[in-house]
């Protein structure tokens, strides 16, 4: 992988090779790499975290990389709990249930109750329940998605469903995609859990929902509707769960194109952390900016304590 990255750099092939290389670099080394302490000093602080009531935080690249907890996360979670903040950990990964996410953090030494997690699968199930209570779906996905749909009173139907719903998962195959394609052509509406085209795995990068649903979109000519980030619906639902107004809530994430944009469009303050996929240069590529750029969530605690004096 490193060789591909090096070749990409040497020959100025900026896209696929370097993207894969960068992703590789981020996935496997960001937990260890030193991010310069710059934004805390340079940026004018635009958020007083002590005054904020609600915190919605992305997980991958913010709390952990793979199975490695990032620096400062323990202190951040402890601060949220001790200060009595309302908080929600959000992921676009539709495969895991709340219980599995709780257990994942438990293995890293964090005790976070199940109700503090929210996934694109739950957002999708909530969306379908509101749009069409008691509807039926043909679903391609893992336990996280299937359980969320069942819990929302949605039934499985592979003959004439109201919707075809796609998430990430091992049940994905030519057979399931072919069935989904024909069901959409017969009138089922196409829903995706999230637009992410790839995600980190232990083995490297794996195609995610946005990429997996593309063959169905192309074969049917139908565009899917996506419920996860950056759809602000997911953020608004999160705010309702926390019983917070957007003006008193913060969205924390490592991606400009999902986390920061969805927080911004929901009226929340936004924090871009450099512990994941983004670096300081990333911000310059977008027409919008986060309220503040920090090295990691540990800086939130430091800044909150500084502001108290
Ligand atoms: Mg992330």
Image (spheres, rainbow, N blue to C red):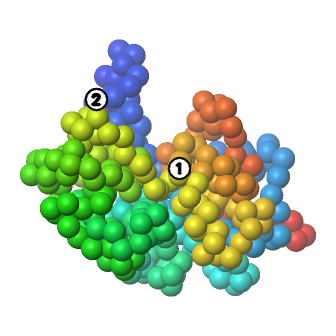
Ligand 1 neighbours mark 2 (CB distance < 8 Å):
no
The earlier-in-sequence mark between 2 and 1 is 2
* Residue displayed at 46% across by 64% down: 131
Asked if residue 135 can be seen in this view, the reply is yes
Q: Is residue 50 depicted above or below 140 in this figure?
A: below
Where is residue 137? Give x, y as percent: 27, 64
- Name the quarter where the C terminus is drawn: bottom right
The residue that mark 2 highlights is: 4
Q: Secondary structure at mark 2?
A: helix
56 or 135, nearer to the observer: 135
237 or 106, nearer to the observer: 237
Horizontal arrangement in the rendering, residue 94 relative to residue 257 (left or right) = left
* Residue displayed at 49% across by 45% down: 277
Where is residue 67? Give x, y as percent: 37, 65
The residue that mark 1 highlights is: 230
Where is residue 266? Give x, y as percent: 67, 55
20 or 195, nearer to the observer: 195
The answer to whether marks 2 and 1 mark residues whose Cβ atoms lie closer than 8 Å is no
Q: Secondary structure at mark 1?
A: loop
């Amino acid at each position: 992988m490193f060789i591909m990255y090096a070749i990409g750099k040497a020959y100025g092939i900026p896209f696929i090779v370097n993207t894969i290389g960068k992703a590789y670099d981020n996935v496997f080394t960001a937990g260890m790499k030193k991010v310069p302490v710059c934004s805390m000093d340079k940026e004018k602080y635009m958020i007083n975290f002590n005054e904020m009531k609600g915190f919605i935080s992305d997980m991958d690249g913010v709390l952990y990389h793979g199975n490695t907890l990032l620096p400062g996360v323990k202190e951040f979670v402890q601060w949220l709990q001790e200060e009595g903040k309302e908080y929600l950990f959000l992921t676009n990964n539709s495969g895991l249930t709340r219980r599995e996410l709780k257990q994942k953090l438990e293995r890293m030494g964090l005790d976070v109750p199940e109700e503090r997690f929210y996934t694109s699968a739950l957002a999708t199930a909530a969306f379908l329940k509101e749009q069409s209570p008691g509807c039926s779906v043909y679903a391609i996905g893992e336990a996280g998605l299937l359980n969320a749909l069942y819990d929302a009173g949605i039934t499985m139907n592979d003959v004439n469903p109201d919707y075809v719903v796609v998430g990430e998962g091992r049940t994905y195959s030519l057979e399931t995609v072919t069935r989904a394609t024909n069901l959409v052509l017969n009138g089922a509406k196409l829903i995706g859990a999230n637009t992410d085209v790839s995600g980190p795995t232990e083995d490297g990068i794996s195609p995610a929902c946005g990429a997996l649903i593309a063959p169905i979109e192309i074969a049917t000519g139908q565009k899917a509707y996506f419920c996860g980030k950056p759809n602000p619906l997911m953020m608004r639902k999160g705010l309702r769960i926390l019983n917070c107004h957007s003006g008193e809530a913060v969205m924390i994430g490592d991606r400009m194109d999902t986390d920061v944009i969805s927080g911004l469009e929901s009226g929340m303050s936004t924090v871009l952390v450099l512990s994941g996929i983004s670096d300081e240069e990333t911000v310059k590529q977008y027409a919008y900016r986060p309220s503040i750029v920090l090295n990691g969530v540990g800086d939130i605690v430091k800044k909150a304590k500084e502001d108290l004096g």
